[in-house]
Image (cartoon, helix red, strand yellow):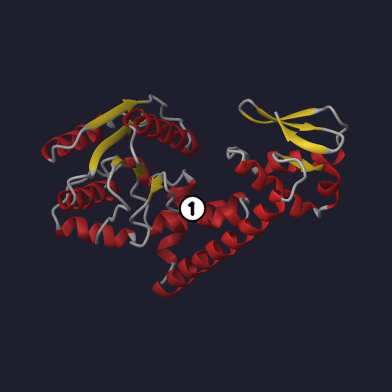
Amino acid sequence: MEAILPKPGIFIVAVSGGVDSMTLLHLLNLEVHKNDKTKLIVAHLDHGIRPDSSLDRKHVQDVSSKLDIPFVYHESKLGAGASEDEARKARYGFLNKVKDSSNATAIVTAHHQDDQIETAIINIIRGSGRKGLTSLKSTDQLLRPLLNYSKKDIINYAKKNNIKWIEDSSNADTKYLRNYIRHQIIPKFDNESRQKFITLLGKQAGVNSELDDLLNLLLNQQDIPGTLDRDWFILLPHNTAKEILASWLRNNNIRTFDKKTLERLVVSGKTARPGLIFPISGARSLKINKNNLALV
């Protein structure tokens, strides 16, 4: 196993203390010794969901100290009733703050092949559409170098290299959808079914890339940059209009919208009278003009 970084720089490594992230830290530390221009910063968030979570922080801090890698952490105090989504938002909010304050190149997480499968299944259940099948991937700002390795690969490597980790007791609680899928659905995949599913996700990633290029081509042909021609938008089939609007929002750095919001905005964009404004996310809203749709 290896975790390759694309270029020298400062990288924020998200380390929870579990087997995945402890293995990632081990592999990245090996990479650092090959390139003295690469630096790591270990970032650990104590979500405050479990009463014993301070043990995770202590373990990660001790290992970071032994490896002579800077360590930062934060306590969120979300409470035992926090949802997976709340925990994820708190985690990435913390990681991005550390990245910005350190002027780092990118964040590195320990997501692996099993996480890809779980996320795709979750997004199918949630009706996230074609993008949900391939949402777990590496980007320039968020690196996931273990995506080609299975959970089994990671555990075997950790045992072989005497990597110590802490088991998160909440990972066994199947009241969480991800844990249910992890313990009740993924184990039922045989090797052939698993590989077919991974191949399907890879093909979908290619299809998504081609569709995104076509959608961006259409968006770049708008008469007024940053707006959508309303007459053209009204004539689009409903599902096509949703794809167009979703791409337009993402291109304008609006990504925190769900399918209900998207449906509401498409209907409003086609039927609402000019002058009305509809909230999207945060301070951003959609304004209905006579001839176009605009963001305000």
Judging depth in this view, the residue of 284 and 84 nearest the camera is 284
Which residue is situated farthest in the left direction here?
66
Q: Quadrant of residue 168?
A: top left
Picture residue at 26% right of the left edge, 50% below the top: 24
Which quarter of the image is occupied by the N terminus? Answer: bottom left
Picture residue at 58% right of the left edge, 38% below the top: 253
Which residue is situated farthest in the bottom direction here?
192
Look at the picture and state if 81 lies above or below 31.
above
- Residue named by callout 1: 119
Which quarter of the image is occupied by the C terminus? Answer: top right
Mark 1 neighbour density, 10 Å: few (under 14) some (14–19) many (20 or more): some
Is 50 on the left or on the right of 277, as rendered? left
Picture residue at 74% right of the left edge, 34% below the top: 294
Look at the picture and state if 41 lies above or below 181.
above
Judging depth in this view, the residue of 254 and 81 nearest the camera is 254
Judging depth in this view, the residue of 95 and 164 nearest the camera is 95
Q: Amino acid at mark 1?
A: Thr
Is 259 on the left or on the right of 273, as rendered? left
Is 280 on the left or on the right of 140, as rendered? right
Instruction: Classify mark 1: helix, strand or loop.
Output: helix
Judging depth in this view, the residue of 223 and 197 nearest the camera is 223
Is 19 on the left or on the right of 200, as rendered? left
Look at the picture and state if 111 lies above or below 41.
below
Picture residue at 49% right of the left edge, 47% below the top: 177
Q: Where is residue 216 shown, x and y percent of the image?
A: 65, 52
Q: Quadrant of residue 142?
A: top left
Q: Where is residue 248 shown, x and y percent of the image?
A: 67, 44
Q: Where is residue 277 shown, x and y percent of the image?
A: 77, 28
Q: Where is residue 96 shown, x and y percent of the image?
A: 40, 33
Report the number of discs.
1
Look at the picture and state if 110 lies above or below 206.
above
